Image: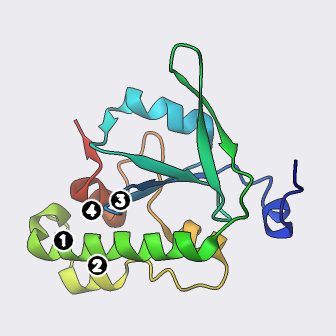
């Protein structure tokens, strides 16, 4: 088995999981695999496929039990591809920008300027991918989320 890349070794302690819709309509960050598994109990659903990554851009492959229950995520043998993930994040932000412009009501009654909210979307150009991941919407259990988090939910990941 190949050794992890130096970039991957530096972030072994960071157990966050990045979920990106296969069609680049959303991304979400979870603090751990346990938190990801707990999500269905919090009524989040998604229509369509998703892909999993660690914070370095390494793909994570789902591991299933004999009964097809998700039991883990295994890093692939391919090296991390932070630029591929960065391009995916940019596509998600472009989708979110279009979605919110077409439906400004998703921001709710927060008395905020649409352009200010959209200007605050992550630009995804930080040289360190971990810093980009830090700027993405994340799930915080028991928390309603910020405007970006809620707009991402409105644009593709719906509480039902």
Precedes in sequence: disc 1 or disc 3: 3
Name the secondary structure under disc 2. helix
Q: Residue at x 39, y 30 (%)?
A: 40
- Foreground label between 3 and 4: 3
State which quadrant residue 129 falls in.
Answer: bottom right
Q: In the rendered view, would you say 160 is above or below 83?
A: above
Q: Answer yes or no: do the residues labelled 2 and 1 have beta carbons within 8 Å?
A: yes
Q: Earlier in the sequence, mark 2 or mark 3?
A: 3
Label pair 3/4, CB-CB below 8 angstroms: no
Residue designated by label 2: 117
10 Å crowding of disc 2: few (<14), some (14-19), many (20+): some
- Percent x, y for residue 35? 55, 37
- Decide which of tag 2 and tag 1 comes sooner along the chain: 1
Residue under the point 74% across and 53% down: 77
| SS for callout 1 | helix
Mark-to-mark CA distance, 4 and 2: 10 Å
Task: Using residue 136 as the reference point, say whether residue 12 is left or right of it.
Answer: right
* Cα gap from disc 4 to disc 1, whole angstroms: 7 Å
N-term mark: 4 or 1: 1
Residue position marked by numbered label 4 in the rendering: 151
CA distance separating discs 1 and 3: 13 Å
Disc 4 to disc 2: CB gap under 8 Å: yes
Q: Residues within 10 Å of mark 3 (few under 14, many from 20)?
A: many
State how the image is colored. rainbow
Residue 110 image position (x, y, % from top left): 20, 67
Label 1 sits on residue: 100
In 3D space, how far apart are the residues under numbered discs 3 and 4 (Cα atoms)?
Answer: 10 Å
Residue behind mark 3: 26
Residue at position x 28%, y 80% in the image: 118
Q: Is residue 3 left or right of residue 89?
A: right
Name the N-terminal-most of marks 4 and 2. Answer: 2
User: Which of the two discs, 3 and 4, labels the residue nearer the N terminus?
Assistant: 3
């Amino acid at each position: 088995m190949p050794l992890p890349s130096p970039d991957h070794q530096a972030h072994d302690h960071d157990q966050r999981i990045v979920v990106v819709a296969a069609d680049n309509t959303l991304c979400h960050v979870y603090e751990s695999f346990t938190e990801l598994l707990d999500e269905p109990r919090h009524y989040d659903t998604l229509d369509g496929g998703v892909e999993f990554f660690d914070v370095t851009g390494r793909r994570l492959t789902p591991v299933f039990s004999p009964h097809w229950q998700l039991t883990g995520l295994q890093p692939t043998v391919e090296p991390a591809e932070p630029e591929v993930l960065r391009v995916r994040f940019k596509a998600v932000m472009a989708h979110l920008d279009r979605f919110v412009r077409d439906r400004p009501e998703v921001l709710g009654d927060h008395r905020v300027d649409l352009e200010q909210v959209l200007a605050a979307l992550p630009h995804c150009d930080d040289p360190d991918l971990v810093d980009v991941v830090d700027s993405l919407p994340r799930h915080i259990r028991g928390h309603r989320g910020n405007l970006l988090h809620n707009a991402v939910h409105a644009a593709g990941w719906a509480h039902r």
